[in-house]
């Protein structure tokens, strides 16, 4: 049986929830009319999406006043990797996997073109501060880029780097070299990375920049990179067109006969 498409209100809800997670609406969620124009839907659709967000405690809706996001209580600090960062243990394996990943990412950067959309020094939001182990409001460099191949747009990348590290590169350098190379040229000794991969529906901004329809499923990647002293040096939010990008993981079985598990042996990223 073919899978039924998601209701429009649920698609709007999913996109707004992602935008809330990214900290886009610090000054308030756009009004119903603005959201109707953004998504090209009726007011009842927008209202159902907002009601869903409100029922989950993500936004606060008061008649006659602007809808605002609900700021969660700060999570307790953690030792070592910290935040949403990473895993302790097996540092050798993490570095071995990262090596292949970084080589693939740098190769991709050298064989694609990039358009720099935005580079600015901003104050760290709650999410950025927690990820990079900074204080709320500390300065960070935010860079937004779209990477393309001969077939068209491939990925939409937003990176956050502590301002003290990013002071040696800006728009011109980001347009010429992969950011990992720029970090190394700035004296960063990359140690390890923690990455999560999920899915995301394209909002109007991503749809326009990646040349897809609003609501198109994208491959969503979040990657937190640490230096060799376990300090977070870059937080990346990436959205990739699945028709032009694949992520491959080679697995091997290890352990005793009755307790074998799969472990990663190699990481690669391929694009067309």
Image (spheres, helix red, strand yellow):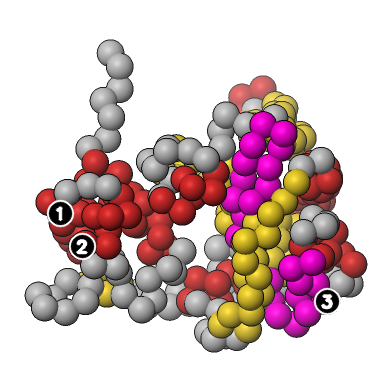
Q: Write down the residue under mark 2.
A: 32
Q: Which residue is mark 1?
A: 43
Corner quadrant of residue 154: top right
Q: Magenta stretch containing residue 165, yes or no? A: yes
Measuring 53% from the left and 84% from the top, which residue is drawn there? Answer: 136
Q: Is residue 50 magenta?
A: no
Mark 2 or 3 closer to N-term?
2
Question: Would you say the residues marked 2 and 1 are in contact, meaning their CB atoms lie under 8 Å apart?
Answer: yes
- Over which residues does the magenta segment extend? 146-172
Q: Residue drawn at (16%, 79%), measured in percent from left and top?
A: 65
> Whole-percent x and y of residue 169?
80, 72
Other-residue count near label 3 (Cα within 10 Å), few / some / many at <14 / 14–19 / ≥20? few
First along the sequence among labels 2 and 1: 2
Q: Is residue 238 left or right of residue 1?
A: right
Residue at horizontal 23 percent and vertical 67 percent from the top: 31
Res. 168 mark? 3
- Please tell me which residue lies in front, 48 or 150: 150
Measured as percent of width and height from the top left, residue 221 is found at 58, 48
Residue located 30% across and 22% down the image: 3
Can I make out residue 34 in this image?
Answer: yes
Q: Earlier in the sequence, mark 3 or mark 1?
A: 1
- Residues at marks 2 and 1, CA–CA distance in whole angstroms: 7 Å
């Amino acid at each position: 049986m073919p899978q039924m498409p998601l209701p429009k209100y649920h698609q709007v809800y999913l996109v707004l929830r992602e935008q809330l997670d990214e900290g886009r609406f610090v000054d308030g969620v756009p009004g119903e009319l603005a959201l109707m124009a953004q998504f090209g839907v009726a007011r009842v659709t927008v209202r159902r999406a907002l009601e869903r967000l409100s029922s989950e405690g993500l936004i606060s809706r008061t008649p006659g006043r602007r809808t605002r996001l609900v700021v969660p209580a700060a999570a307790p600090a953690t030792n070592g990797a910290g935040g949403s960062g990473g895993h302790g243990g097996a540092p050798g394996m993490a570095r071995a996997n990262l090596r292949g990943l970084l080589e693939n990412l740098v190769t991709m950067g050298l064989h694609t073109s990039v358009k720099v959309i935005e580079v600015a020094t901003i104050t760290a939001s709650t999410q950025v501060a927690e990820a990079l182990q900074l204080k709320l409001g500390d300065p960070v460099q935010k860079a937004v880029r779209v990477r393309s191949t001969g077939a068209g747009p491939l990925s939409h990348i937003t990176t956050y780097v502590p301002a003290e590290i990013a002071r040696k590169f800006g728009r011109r350098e980001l347009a010429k070299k992969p950011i990992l190379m720029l970090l190394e040229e700035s004296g960063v000794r990359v140690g390890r990375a923690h990455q999560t991969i999920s899915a995301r529906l394209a909002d109007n901004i991503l749809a326009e920049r990646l040349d897809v329809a609003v609501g198109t499923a994208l491959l969503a990647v979040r990657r937190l990179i640490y230096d060799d002293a376990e300090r977070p040096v870059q937080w990346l939010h990436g959205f990739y067109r699945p028709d032009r990008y694949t992520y491959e993981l080679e697995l091997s079985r290890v352990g005793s006969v009755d307790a074998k598990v799969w472990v990663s042996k190699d990481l690669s990223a391929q694009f067309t």
